[in-house]
Image (cartoon, rainbow, N blue to C red):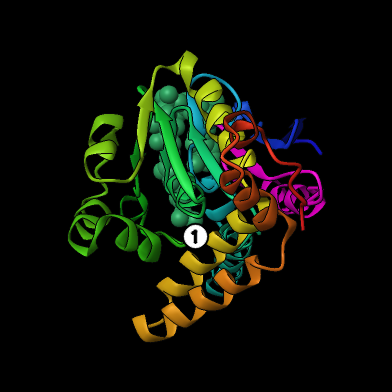
Amino acid sequence: MEFITYEQDGFVGIVTINRPKALNALNSQVLEEIEATFDAIDLENTRAVVLTGAGEKSFVAGADIGEMSTLTKAEGEAFGKKGNDVFRKIETFPIPVIAAINGFALGGGCEISMSCDIRICSDNAVFGQPEVGLGITPGFGGTQRLARLVGAGMAKQMIYSARNIKADEAYRIGLVNAVYTQEELLPQAKKLAATIAANAPIAVRNCKKAINDGLEVDMDAAIVIEEKLFGDCFETEDQKAGMGNFLEKDKEKKLKVVPFQNK
Ligand code: CAA
């Protein structure tokens, strides 16, 4: 891998996009390496992933403008599909992915963060979909996920105006869940990931699937999805251990981390 580093910290995987010369912009190779990195994550021993950018200035400054500048219509569509396929892989990845946004999250950078389950950022983060200023539309899911996350009105304003917003505004409109200092961001992301990883892993995976799949259908179909995934949990050791601890009324045991099974 030239542009991606992967680190395993207990049950937490940390994926870092590392192309500092271009502020971590996404060219084809970076996209392919992100996909290969996620494909290689050991899902037996990993329960949450943190995605971040190398350096102090940028999370991801967008899709690579140099690479896009000479694309034909067909090539443009194929490039969009390439990004969309990778981001969809992140969105539907079996375990939660937390974006730790440490600076510019523009265009494809904002878009990759929106394919993650949770977004937290540093106080120097800048978000935006500047594509119409470059003569294109957002092409890695921005027209779809931004509207779903912050509402159609705010998404349309950001996308049509190509105006960037700072961390505090991203927090106000619900694009990020929390803002930290630059020093605090990664430790906080790892802490959140570790908190998730301490819970029953099958239950957490089922929650992700229930929320994601349920949002794509009407409420009658959505609650059936939930019922099925809820029922599945009753076949797990985690459910027996977790509820058994509670019913034993033993404070020590209640607080003890149960030896969760992973699949
Ligand atoms: N693609 C390719 N290279 C990029 C890049 C991008 N998206 N963003 C930054 N870079 C490169 C710059 O060309 C520059 O390279 P050189 O040193 O070789 O000249 C290097 O990164 C540093 O950038 P700047 O000198 O511009 O740094 P700055 O601090 O002055 O500005 C910035 C930072 C505001 C983020 C500015 O770089 C910028 O506006 N970048 C482009 C942001 C953008 O428009 N992103 C959306 C791309 S379109 C897209 O993503 C489409 C899609 O939906 C799929």
- Which residue: 64% across, 50% down? 244
Residue 251 horizontal/vertical position (percent): 57, 31
Write down the region rendered in magenta.
23-51
The quadrant holding residue 5 is: top right
**Mark 1: few/some/many CA within 10 Å (<14, 14-19, 20+):** many
* Magenta stretch contains residue 246: no
Q: Secondary structure at mark 1?
A: loop
Marks counted in the figure total 1
Residue 231 horizontal/vertical position (percent): 59, 73
- Which residue: 66% across, 59% down? 94
Q: Is residue 187 left or right of residue 160?
A: right
**Quadrant placement of the N terminus:** top right
Q: Mark 1 sits on what residue? A: 140
Residue 144 horizontal/vertical position (percent): 38, 66
* Residue 137 in view here: no
Foreground residue, 218 or 63?
A: 218
Foreground residue, 55 or 253?
A: 253
Does any atom of ligand 1 lie closer than 8 Å to the CB of label 1? Answer: yes
- Which residue: 42% across, 78% down? 223
Q: Is residue 134 left or right of residue 53?
A: left
* Residue 8 in view here: yes
**Quadrant placement of the C terminus:** bottom right
- Which residue: 76% across, 52% down? 262
* Magenta stretch contains residue 34: yes
